[in-house]
Image (cartoon, grey):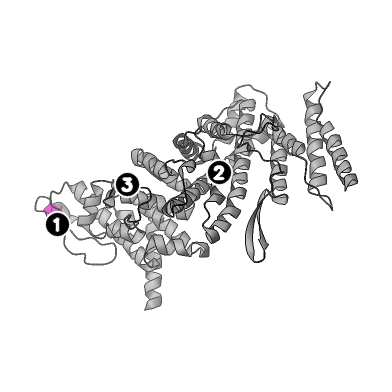
Amino acid sequence: MDKAQNNNRGFDENTMAILDSSGIKDSRDIHDDRVSFLEAVRSTSLASDSPSAPSWNMYDAIFKILRDSESLELAMASYQILSDLDKQYLRVYLTNSGGTDELVIVKEIWSPFILVQESVITSNHLFDTLKFSALIEDMAQAVNSLDVQEGMKAVRNMLLFQYLVNVLEADFIPRHTLYKESLNWVLFRESVLNMILGSRKVNFKSLVRDCMSLVLKRCRHNMRNSLQDLKVVKESGKSTNDSDVSLVNAIPELQRRTCSAVQKLFTLIMGLDDIRKEADLLGATSRIDGFRSPALEIILDELTYNINHVSPFLEVFAEPKWKLEIILLYFSKYCLKHSVRTRRSNDAPKDLTLEGVLNYFSSTMSTKSIMKKITSEVAQVLLAHAFQACLSLKHDPEHIHDSTEKIGATLLQICNNIISAFQNLRKIDDLKLLGCPCYMVFEQEGPEFEYSRPLCHQNENLLFNSSPCVGPQSWNLELTSFEKEALFTAAIISSQKLGTEG
């Protein structure tokens, strides 16, 4: 065993020596040495017949290459090998002993996070709580630049963020699996994510807002003008080479993945908040756990006070469980009367379901009442995305419980209610368009999508000269292509279900 340890120590020293740049001034030579180092680590720790985990110093050196890299090749190579090493050598995992799952934490393995003051760790490029929040802030504030060096900084930040979120997820998942069996809050009290977010050094609201900004400003557009950027670089007289072109071409995909990483981080945070809420009700938390506002509340506040952000945010945020939760909470601000309650009260009102939301749009009078608080444009966006989330949950076996709990009705009922909701939104919009002071309506008659005319003598000629609607394309109420697709999908599913039952 001593011989094996000596051999490993000798390999580590020889491999680390590749990075010794003493006396080397040529940046190309330094670049080649780092590529050789990464290849050596991959060969020994991943591709070998008997691979061995890299030492702490080797892990740290790879991460430093990622943080300091000035070329796309080195940044991508170091990111990929770190990701592959994390899959091969787990820091946290579950083991089964005597039929009981146990959590194993390998403290000896290197981690990109420093969560405690440890005198033995002198690396200044690892991430503590402040550096992690600063990274997100830098990404949110960054603007697209035609300067290659600034573009490389953006690439480094995106890759670092993606990697760090993957590390948080790998720490979270096994704890969550075991928590569902034991309801032991300590599992998450000691999680990396909880220690980062629970630190008093972090302004959690700012962190959530910065993540939302990433979704709204960068992820939504996804650098669609990258080719135009390259054209501008050429026209500006700046020299372009293969590395510049590769950088510009790589950024759209990196931004897409960064957008997915932001959503993953949101999902992890909201999952942690959900577990914390359950632990509060069980009396498992204490003062040492501190207190912060749940991410959902912050997101909801931002969307409530910036209604122009509702559509783009929901367009990007794809996780169906939490998308539906956001929409239901948005409606609950205007549909439910909230009572004052303590953080551990057990008499909280029943949560609003999608069926409950649609009931508020079941008649023109109830729809008119809601429209006093929410614009028709926002209501359409919320209902269309809620229907999309409903379809995803209904067709995903992993979300059977969520679909039953949050939807509250069959798919056929939801489809019929979605159609009815859009019809009633249209009726209210038509009344507003005609300036009608009277909101009494006949009972609906005629074919599907046809609406009844209001009883209004002032607009009698206009009303009785108008023709019935045969579909959303003839509505005065403007619908986006996504909303039209949702409405027609509901109609198709409804007709198919009715045909099957018939």
Amino acid carrying mark 1 in the image: Met
Whole-percent x and y of residue 277?
A: 43, 51
- Label 3: which residue? 377
- Label 2: which residue? 193
Cα separation between marks 2 and 1: 54 Å
In the image: residue 500, left or right of residue 133: left
Please say if 110 is above or below 151: below
Among the 4 quarters of the image, the one containing residue 125: top right
Whole-percent x and y of residue 170?
A: 62, 49
Q: Which residues are magenta?
A: 436-461
**Residue at position x 76%, y 36% in the image:** 57
Task: Please tell me which of labels 1 and 3 falls first in the chain.
Answer: 3
Secondary element under disc 1, as helix, strand or loop, is loop
Whole-percent x and y of residue 396?
A: 51, 63
In the image: residue 367, left or right of residue 197: left
Q: Choose between 248 and 262: the one closer to the eye.
A: 262
Amino acid carrying mark 3 in the image: Glu
- Label 1: which residue? 440
**Residue at position x 90%, y 45% in the image:** 3
> Does the magenta stretch mainly form a helix, a strand or a loop?
loop
Cα separation between marks 1 and 3: 23 Å
Secondary element under disc 3, as helix, strand or loop, is helix
The quadrant of the picture occupied by the C terminus is bottom left
